[in-house]
Image: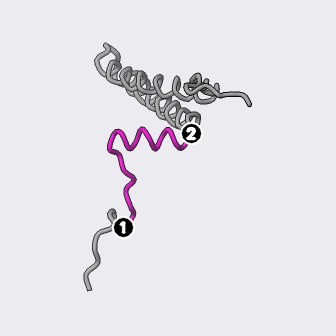
Amino acid sequence: MTATPATSAPQKKPLRFRIGIALLVLSALTYVAVLVILFLPLDSGTKAAAFGGTLVVAETCALIGMAGVGKEAVRAVRSRLGLRRRSRAAEQPPTTD
């Protein structure tokens, strides 16, 4: 019989999970860049294009990052932040008879 140690070494996270976390951090930093763009001395057309492009990059990084970390990690983060999924019944106005 071989005895297993009571304290095992922490498991190494898969590469997909680590890339997902990195993309989520990049997404948060990109949202900060959106705020910086607003105060840059650019003309309005350039500022609008940079603003829109940066938002697209931030959302894409967030979505791919959430896919990378997995459903369980996203649920854990949402529960810690107090974010709940809205039900469709709550969104619809009540009907009167």
Viewer-nearest residue: 90 or 40:
90
Residue 30 visible in the snapshot: yes
In the picture of the structure, the residue carrying the numbered disc 1 is 89
Please tell me whether residue 66 is drawn above or below residue 34 in the rendered image: below
Q: x and y percent of residue 95 in the render?
A: 29, 78
Magenta span of residues: 71-88
**Residue 79 pos. (x, y %):** 38, 44
Quadrant assignment, res 11: top right
Q: Secondary structure at mark 2?
A: loop
Q: Nearer the viewer, residue 14 or 7?
A: 7
Quadrant (top left, top right, bottom left, bottom right) of the N terminus = top right
Tell me if residue 5 is in the magenta stretch: no
Quarter of the image for residue 35 reads top left
Q: Residue furthest right?
A: 1
> In which image quadrant can residue 68 be found?
top right
Kindly identify the amino acid type of the residue bearing the numbered disc 1.
Answer: Ala
Q: Residue furthest bottom?
A: 97
Residue drawn at x 32%, y 15% is: 40
Q: Is residue 16 left or right of residue 60?
A: right
Q: Is residue 50 left or right of residue 12?
A: left
Tell me: 22 left or right of 81. Answer: right
Q: Is residue 19 visible?
A: no
